[in-house]
Amino acid sequence: MDVNKILASAFVSVVVSIDLTDDDDIDPDIATDILEPAAALFRDLSGEGRREVTSLILGCAELEENPERRRAILALPEAIDLLDVD
């Protein structure tokens, strides 16, 4: 597995775990504070870069066996504004 796939898989794992955690276990404001800086980095990518990250994330979804986690992964590109390519 190449480095980009490993990094994307690690990012997706952390984000989805935070997203699916009960609000009583992690405050939603804290979750946003954790994830927003990473999302901002992705928004700064070129259109080609955003498409590449989106492809890597969708690849993670294909490998995910848990339906709830798969749905969260599939929603991730839109949630972090990767699909708003100029």
Image: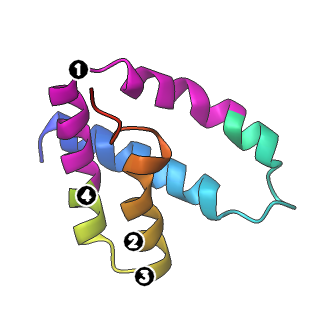
Please tell me in which quadrant of the rendered image residue 49 appears. Answer: top left
Which quadrant is the C terminus positioned in? top left
Q: Nearer the viewer, mark 1 or mark 3?
A: 1
The numbered mark, 4 or 1, whose residue comes first in the sequence reads 1
Is 66 positioned to the left or the right of 54 in the image?
right
Dominant secondary structure, magenta: helix
Give the secondary structure at mark 4: helix
- Give the residue type that dot 1 points to: Ser
**Nearer to me, 14 or 59:** 59
Residue assigned mark 4:
58
Please provide percent x and percent y for residue 58: 25, 58
Residue 32 lies, in percent from the top left, at 69, 38
Quick one: label 3, few (<14), some, or many (20+) residues within 10 Å?
Answer: few
Quarter assignment of residue 48: top left
Stretch of the chain drawn in magenta: 33-57
Separation (CA) of disc 1 from disc 3? 31 Å
Contact, CB < 8 Å: mark 1 with mark 2? Answer: no
Q: Is residue 42 magenta?
A: yes
**21 over 78 or under it: above or below:** below
Binning the other alpha carbons within 10 Å of mark 1 as few (below 14), some (14 to 19) or many (20 upward) gives: few
Q: Residue 67: give its label.
A: 3
Which residue type carries mark 3?
A: Pro
